[in-house]
Amino acid sequence: MNAIEDNEFRRAWQKVGSYFGEGQRWPKPQLILCVSAHWLTRGWGLTAMDHPATIHDFGGFPPELHAQQYPAPGAPGYAEQIAKLIQQPAPGQSSHAKGEDLFLDRQQWGFDHGTWSVLKPMFPAADIPVIQMSIDYSADMDAHFELGRQLSALRELGVLIVGSGNTVHNLRAMSRTAANTEAFDWNKAFDDWVASCINEGDLRRLMQFQSLGDIAKLAQPSYEHYLPILYVAGAARLDDRVEYFSETYQAKSVAMRSVIWY
């Protein structure tokens, strides 16, 4: 609902989107690569169609949300180049050992709500080509981070890398009447731990989130919403600056912290 409601989160995404363009903080991206928590596959893949569909992968929401479209063009040519440039870590080996190329999805997927619900407020004109990358949910944590390290090379080509998930995501524990300043203790503890890893520049420590035990199990019961941060953290550089926005919560059991490396 943050995609269509006028609230602090939508306004924050709109503000970040305004940072891009002629005369702004950063140039307009040539391409957006979005890693969404909602496309889980065996191996890693890229959307590679001219006109990706807008996927409404949810239920029980108002018709207005189901009617949303994000008609940004795809970029099959770029997808083919990226698939050759980036190789997925070989299963069962060191994360630095390379396995198969990323697969190209030319018809089945598209932009799920992890992608369009964030990009639509940021870039409402939908005039920047977008590729969505899937997540291999069976992979080791260091493999996600290693793939992010490879993605870093795309930054030199004017590619904006977006990871769409949540530092804390437990929908079963939601308290819908809670204010955005309220959070369960485990929510705040886990979100604070993520921030400490980033603030200290110890980004590889983000892979060790399960060491937090019960706090991690409550914060990320199935952890697919956590994984996107490993890709963008992997793509970060030692000399990057860091900025946060949306450092609050939703329904006490979701953390909306967002981070920019630049």
Image (cartoon, rainbow, N blue to C red):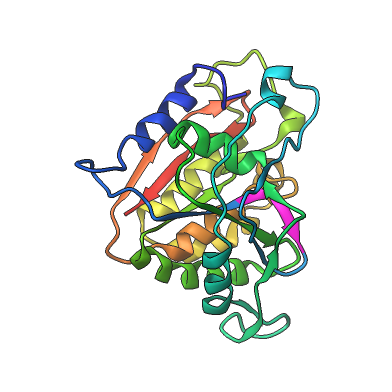
Foreground of the two, 80 or 243: 80
Quadrant in which residue 111 is drawn: top right
Q: Residue at 31% x, 42% y: name it.
A: 20
**How far across and how far down the image is residue 88, in percent?**
63, 76
Can you say which quadrant of the picture contains the N terminus? top right
Residue furthest left as drawn? 23
Indicate left or right for 220 with 256 as reference: right
Indicate left or right for 191 with 140 as reference: left
**How far across and how far down the image is residue 129, in percent?**
49, 51
**In the rendered image, the vertical position of residue 220 relative to residue 79, given as above or below:** above
Indicate left or right for 41 with 201 as reference: right
Q: Residue at 75% x, 38% y: name it.
A: 57
Q: Residue at 68% x, 67% y: name it.
A: 104
Q: Is residue 62 visible?
A: no
Quadrant in which residue 141 is drawn: bottom right
The secondary structure making up most of the magenta span is strand
Q: Is residue 57 visible?
A: yes
Foreground of the two, 42 or 217: 42
Query: Per the image, is 37 magenta?
Result: yes
**In the rendered image, the vertical position of residue 220 relative to residue 104, given as above or below:** above
Foreground of the two, 198 or 66: 66
**How far across and how far down the image is residue 169, in percent?**
65, 39
Residue furthest right as drawn? 59
Can you say which quadrant of the picture contains the C terminus? bottom left
Which segment is the magenta one? 36-41
**In the rendered image, the vertical position of residue 138 relative to residue 186, given as above or below:** below
